[in-house]
Amino acid sequence: MSTLTPEEPTVQARIQASFDKQGLMGTLGASILRIAPGEVDIALSPSSAVSQQHGFVHAGAVSAIADTAAGYAALSLMPPGAGVLTTEFKINLVAPAAGEQIVARGRVVKAGRTLTLAQTEVFAETAGKERLVALLTATLMKIEGRDGVAD
Amino acid sequence: MSTLTPEEPTVQARIQASFDKQGLMGTLGASILRIAPGEVDIALSPSSAVSQQHGFVHAGAVSAIADTAAGYAALSLMPPGAGVLTTEFKINLVAPAAGEQIVARGRVVKAGRTLTLAQTEVFAETAGKERLVALLTATLMKIEGRDGVAD
Amino acid sequence: MSTLTPEEPTVQARIQASFDKQGLMGTLGASILRIAPGEVDIALSPSSAVSQQHGFVHAGAVSAIADTAAGYAALSLMPPGAGVLTTEFKINLVAPAAGEQIVARGRVVKAGRTLTLAQTEVFAETAGKERLVALLTATLMKIEGRDGVAD
Amino acid sequence: MSTLTPEEPTVQARIQASFDKQGLMGTLGASILRIAPGEVDIALSPSSAVSQQHGFVHAGAVSAIADTAAGYAALSLMPPGAGVLTTEFKINLVAPAAGEQIVARGRVVKAGRTLTLAQTEVFAETAGKERLVALLTATLMKIEGRDGVAD
C-alpha cells in the first residue's frame, strides 16, 4: 500500500459511501474487502438467502458482486462527481459457487474517455484455498452532468 | 393457452417448486408471473432493497431475474429429472431500471441436446406502459445424473 | 417499403458506399441484401475461402457479417456524417454454419444518444429453408467529429 | 520452453495441420506464431483486404483470429481425436486495430470435461510496442465421436 497517492483515501471513502447506498449489496450481505486505483474486491458469504435451487450461490448474486466490483474499479479512476453505469457485462460461470466465502476481484483493463472495460475474477474460498468460479467482463460508462448520477 | 399439452401443469409445478427453492428469489422478492413451454416470466418490485447507488434497480438484481427466467424457460423443455445450470450470460442494460414493476420475459431460442440458448427481455412497467431496460442472452446446460442437480 | 421517407434512398446509398470501403467484406465475398431504417441484411456464400477446419463457415466469418449487419443497422438511424464503431459484441453459435447461403439480419433494439444496441440473427439457407445458426448482440458507438471516422 | 513434455511436438503438429485446413485463416493471411499447452498466438498483417470502412482492421477479422487462438488454446489440452467448436464468444474492442501487426494471444482459463473457457488478448504492434485493442472470452465445446469433427 506504499504506492498510495494523497487522493486515494478520498477515492476509498467515495467508493465506500457509494457502496453503502447500494441497497442490494446490503440485502445480499456483501462487503468491500479492498479498494485500490483500478481495483476493487467484494466479498459475499454463501447462505440460503443468496442460493439457487441446488444450494449453490445463485449466478445472479455472483453477477451482482462481480458487476459491482467492476463498476467501482472503473469509478476509482474517474474524476470526483462523475457517475458510473454498467452498459453491459458477460459472465462465464465455470464452477458451482460454493465455499466459505465468494470473492469478486474487479480490475480495470482499459479506461477510455467515455467507456471503461473492466474484468472481474470471482473465486470461492474454502479452507484457505481459492478456486475460480466465474469470469466477468463489463463495459462501464462515465456519466457527467446528469442529476442524481454521481459516484 | 389452447396449445397446452397434458404435461404442462407438471412442468409448471416443477418449475414453481424449483423457483421456491431459490433463496435469492425470495430475498429479492421476485415471483413467477407465467410459465409456458419455452417461456417463463418473472417479476420484481423496485425498492431500496434491490437498488444501486442512484436508486435504480441494481444491474445485479435485473440480471438475477433475467438469468432465472432464461434458465426456467430452458428447463421447461427438458425431461423431468434433468437439472439446468447457467454456463454464461451476457446482458445489455439499455435504460435505467425504474418503475412500478420490472418484468423479465425469458424465451428459448434454440434447445440443443446439451446446451440451450435462451434470451430474456427485461421491461420496466409504469402506468400501464412498458419500456425495454435490458436484453440478456444465456447458455444453459442440461445436467443429468449428477447428485443434487435436478430441476 | 411504402413507409420509406425521402431520406432513405440517401441512407441506402450512404451505407452501400461505406460497405464498399470495407475491404474485408470484399475479401469474404459478402454483399448487402437489404437496407431499411434500423435493419440491414448481409449475405455470404459458403466456400473453402471462408471455412474452418471441419468445412463449416468459420465463426469468424459468421461474426464478421453479423457484426457488419448490426453496425449498419445502427448507422442507418444516425445522422449523416456520424461514424459508427463496434465497442463489443457477443455471438452464440447454435448450429454449424453450412448451406447454400448464410444470411445475417441485423436489427436495432435500442438507439441511444451515444450507444446503440443491435441484434443480428444469422441463418443458413438450404433448398429454400432457413435455419438459425447464430445470434449476436452488439453495442455500437456513435462517433462525431473525429477525422476519418464517418459512416 | 524447457517445460515441454514429449507430447507437445505432436500437439503442435496437430494444431498446425488443423489451422492449415481453415480456409479463412489463409484468406485473411493469418499465421500461428506460437503453440504451447493451453496457449496459442496468431498474427495478422493489417491491409486493405481485412479492413473496415475507416481503414482499421475489421472487428470481424480481429474476432476471427481471436476466436481461433482461443479455440486452439483449448484444443491443445484435449485428447487426440477430439474436435473443438466455439459455442459462444464475446469481444470488447477497446481501441482501433491498426499497426504493423495484430497479435491474438489465446489462453485457457478453465478446461472442463465438456466446456473450456478461454480468453484472448489482442494487441496491435507498432515500432516494437504493443497496445491492447481487444479482449475476447470464449466457450469451446469438446466434440467426440462426431464424423468430420476432429481437431
Image: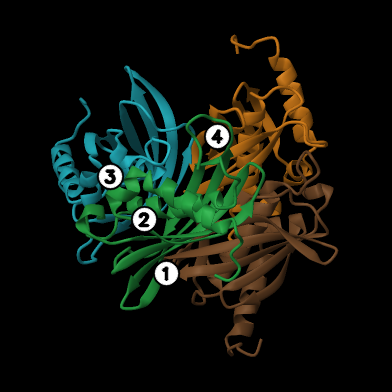
Chain colours: A green, B cyan, C orange, D brown
Is disc 3 on the same chain as disc 1? no
**Image coords of residue C35 (percent x, y):** 65, 24
Query: Which residue matches tag 4?
Result: C117
Q: What element does badge 3 sit on?
A: helix
Query: Which residue matches tag 2?
Result: A62
- In the rendered image, the vertical position of residue D103 relative to residue C32, given as above or below: below
| Any part of residue C51 in sight | no
Callout 1 environment at 10 Å: few (<14), some (14 to 19), or many (20+)? some
**Amino acid type of the residue tagged 3 in the rendering:** Tyr
**Image coords of residue B24 (percent x, y):** 25, 49
Query: Can you tell which of label 2 and label 4 is closer to the viewer?
Result: 2
Query: Can you tell which of label 2 and label 3 is closer to the viewer?
Result: 2
Q: What element does badge 4 sit on?
A: strand
Q: Quadrant of residue A42?
A: bottom left
Measured in 3D between alpha carbons, the distance from the residue under mark 2 to the one under mark 3, in whole angstroms, is 18 Å
**Amino acid type of the residue tagged 4 in the rendering:** Leu
